[in-house]
Image: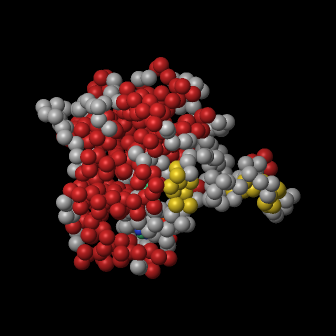
Amino acid sequence: MTEKKAILKVEGRDDLELPILTPTLGRDEIDVSSLTANGLFTFDPGFTSTASCESKITYIDGEVGKLLHRGYSIEELAAKSDYLEVCYLLLNGELPNAEQKEAFVGTVKNHTMVHEQIRNFFNGFRRDAHPMAIMCGVVGALSAFYHDSLDITNPEHREITAYRLIAKMPTIAAMCYKYGLGQPLMYPRNDLGYAENFLHMMFGNPCEETQVSPTLARAMDKIFILHADHEQNASTSTVRLAGSSGANPFACIAAGISALWGPAHGGANEAVLNMLDEIGDISQIETYIAKAKDKNDPFKLMGFGHRVYKNYDPRATVMRESCHEVLNELGVNDPKLELAMKLEEIALSDPYFKEKKLFPNVDFYSGIILKAIGIPTSMFTVIFALSRTVGWVAHWNEMISNPYKIGRPRQLYTGEKERHLVPLNERK
Ligand code: CMC
């Protein structure tokens, strides 16, 4: 932080000096928090220019397409690490040594089962409910279970909450899928790795031993890493906002899941595959590009564009490579990959997409890999939620561990001025 200052000139008022904050990486930020005391607010719908908090967890440089977790690039983490190591890093700030990793993995494994009563919640849902709807409800219900660790001011309680969430999300995600199928809900197997166990619970059944392909488990683990955190996105900001009132952390995560669900955020992975289905064939690409450019048509090219990235999303680059690897290793020839690559090529050479700096984002290729793994489309966003839980809990914990205020934005009121109520019998 430096001593630089901005001067705010407002007609009819004295000049205001506002401190400029300098981050370790990224743009300078004008600290406007003193404006309230000086009778002014700022107006920034959608928070396009507003930093809502200070954070040490994740850094994105959208202009060059860079994503760092605790200083490590996503490319390096995806190539040389695994998901639980990334979880440890996000939560603790450093990569674990061998001993710390063993202890962390062991603790996560101790918490993979959910309370038997949780199973009863599933029976309240229709079998054809969207798995995200079930997940919102069931994760919210976790807030009724852990009365031993309800003190959010206690760091140990927060730590155990993080362990529980990371450990139980794969179990709950797989239960959401199995419930829809009408198959028995599977118990976790703690002799398996994190991604391997998730695939076991998704595709296994109690009648026979599951053999999980190491190729698929590796691909799944990479997908978890690529979605683990993304600084102050809509769902993470939702978790922070809910948490800022002192709410139960499981309820806060359920709020994050709800925010993630929309097609402009985590729901885009499902929407990309639906869009590729709708386009159907390379010959139709031009028609859909024209629709995406038409201001009067609500159609958007799903998996394209990002609030922060004005360059290729680095997660999309890793996902694209991984997509080729997985399809090659599985010997799958999915025409959707060819369609997606052609769509990308045509969109990237189109002046509309170039001028607006619309590039493929993480969701553009993830659906194709998930489909190759055998995951149904309706489960894509559930897998995003599972992966992002560590990011949500790391941000929640960072907020609660430091001085914070309840999140309470202001508004630009454009409604009626004060007026008097006319009695009902006199109203026209
Ligand atoms: N197809 C066509 N036009 C687009 C697209 C798109 N996918 N995305 C943005 N635009 C246009 C938009 O119409 C606007 O045009 P104009 O300036 O003429 O009004 C301009 O580009 C700027 O877009 P915006 O919607 O104002 O930008 P935003 O920062 O508010 O929205 C976004 C970002 C991700 C919501 C948006 O790009 C979008 O809806 N993309 C498709 C959904 C998607 O893939 N979402 C996943 C995001 S990555 C996963 C995650 O982290 O959640």
Is 100 situated above or below 215? above
Which residue reaches farthest right?
14
Q: Is residue 396 left or right of residue 134?
A: right
Quadrant in the rendering for residue 295: bottom left
Residue drawn at point x = 51 percent, y = 42 percent:
95
Depth check: give the residue in front, 279 or 26.
26
Identify the residue shown where x is 25% and y is 37%: 201
- Residue drawn at x 23%, y 32% as measured from the top left: 185
Q: Nearer the viewer, residue 204 or 78?
A: 78
Q: How is the image coloured?
A: secondary structure
**One can see residue 13 in this view:** no
Closest to the observer: 304 or 371? 371
> Would you place residue 118 above or below residue 299 in this image?
above
Q: Position of residue 169 (x, y in %)?
A: 37, 36
- Farthest residue, direction front: 98
Residue 396, position in %: x, y? 54, 38
- Where residue 269 appears, as percent x and y from the top left, is 35, 56
Please name the residue shown 34% across and 39% down the image.
Answer: 194
* Residue lying at the far left of the rendered structure: 207
At which x and y percent is residue 117?
A: 31, 23
Q: Is residue 77 above or below residue 247?
A: below
| Most foreground residue, 69 or 12 | 69
Q: Work out whether 183 lies above or below 378.
A: above
Residue 3 appears anywhere in the view: yes
